[in-house]
Amino acid sequence: MSAALNGLAIGVIGAGAWGTALAQMLASDGRAVALWAREPDLAATINATRRNPTYLPGATLAETITATSDLAAMAALPVLLWVTPAQFLGSVLSGLPHYAGDLVLCAKGIEAGTGRLMAEVARAAAPAAQVAVLSGPTFAHEVAAGLPTAVTLACSGGDAQWQRLAPTIARPTFRPYYSADVIGAEIGGAVKNVLAIACGVVEGLGLGQNARAALISRGFAEMQRFGLAMGAQAETLAGLSGLGDLVLTCSSSSSRNFSLGKALGEGQTASAALAGRATVAEGAYTAPVLADLARQKGIAMPLVDAVVTLVQGQAPARDVVASLLARPLRAERPLG
């Protein structure tokens, strides 16, 4: 299989819904793309049928996508989009410790147990790689279908890396915008996953659109407080990878995190709602570590704390909402 990857310029690590959609988008102009799947059977199915029935059913994949389960073979590619779930990034990337190309991180989360953002995890596992972050309002099925999408591409290597990556990743319906703020792009994606669970709870409880709008607004204030304390730029948090992604994932059951919250709001236990899912709701794993980091920095994030209470099964959704509504009245401040 490694011979089949000779001469390719770009690969995608992770054949879940988002990784498969990115591979499909990259192949939309006829360019060859390598797609790594952890399961050999899934790689074989994609190559034989042009389908990924487990993670992206309904999409017919381009003939120029080559699937493989040979991770070592991907090391020869100069650009890798890394799309494994956030909690597995370090363990999978440890299989390519000497990778020295452009490593574009597409998973959104914070590593449980360490509190590290994905770029920190990547630099520790593959120190020679040039790290970038791709984040923004993206549903996999829409990207795979070629619907217009805009994202943030935050480059640790500055303008030189952007000049390499932009023409490799951009397509007529997939438009990246440049940023040098890797921390901001990462925090926006991680925090919005947690807030999307909260918005799903609002939907599951039938609390209405007023409540959803209020939650998005107050959740954005929490994102800003945390992001600025971590060194993010306010412009990044107000852009595609922050506010843009927050609005999308807090508004549709197509979001895995939103659908998890909806199930919690409808009365399912956290263990039942998380069990048997083919895809990962990253917010459930990010919420506790995000709350811990916020406490360490003295940052108030009551909505994040409420999500932790829910995903850890400490109280039913209606009680958690009642507790939030009973908080002391106060002035509204842009970051308060």
Image (cartoon, rainbow, N blue to C red):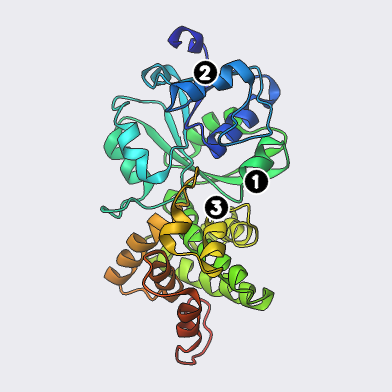
In space, the residues marked 1 and 3 are separated at their CA atoms by 20 Å
For the point 48% across and 76% down, the residue is 335
Q: Label 1 is placed on what type of residue? A: Ala
First reached walking from the N terminus: tag 2 or tag 3: 2
Q: Label 2: which residue?
A: 44
The crowding category of the residue bearing disc 1, from other C-alpha atoms within 10 Å (few below 14, some 14 to 19, many at least 20), is some
Which one is in front in this view, the residue at disc 1 or the one at disc 3?
A: 3
Query: Do residues under tags 1 and 3 come within 8 Å of each other at their CB atoms?
Result: no
- Report whether residue 232 is seen: no
Q: Label 3 crowding class (10 Å Cα cut-off): few <14, some 14-19, many 20+?
A: many
Q: Are marks 2 and 3 in contact (CB under 8 Å)?
A: no
Q: Does residue 314 appear in this view?
A: yes
Tag 2's secondary structure?
Answer: helix
Q: Where does the image place residue 216, in percent across and percent down from the top left?
A: 58, 70
Tag on residue 150? 1
- Pick whichever, 267 or 335, lies toward us: 267
Which numbered circle lies on residue 276? none
The residue shown at (49%, 41%) is: 106
- Label 2 crowd bin: few (<14), some (14–19), many (20+), radius 10 Å: some
Q: Which residue is mark 3?
A: 256
Q: Position of residue 336 (x, y in %)?
A: 47, 79
* Residue type (three-letter) at the residue carrying disc 3: Arg
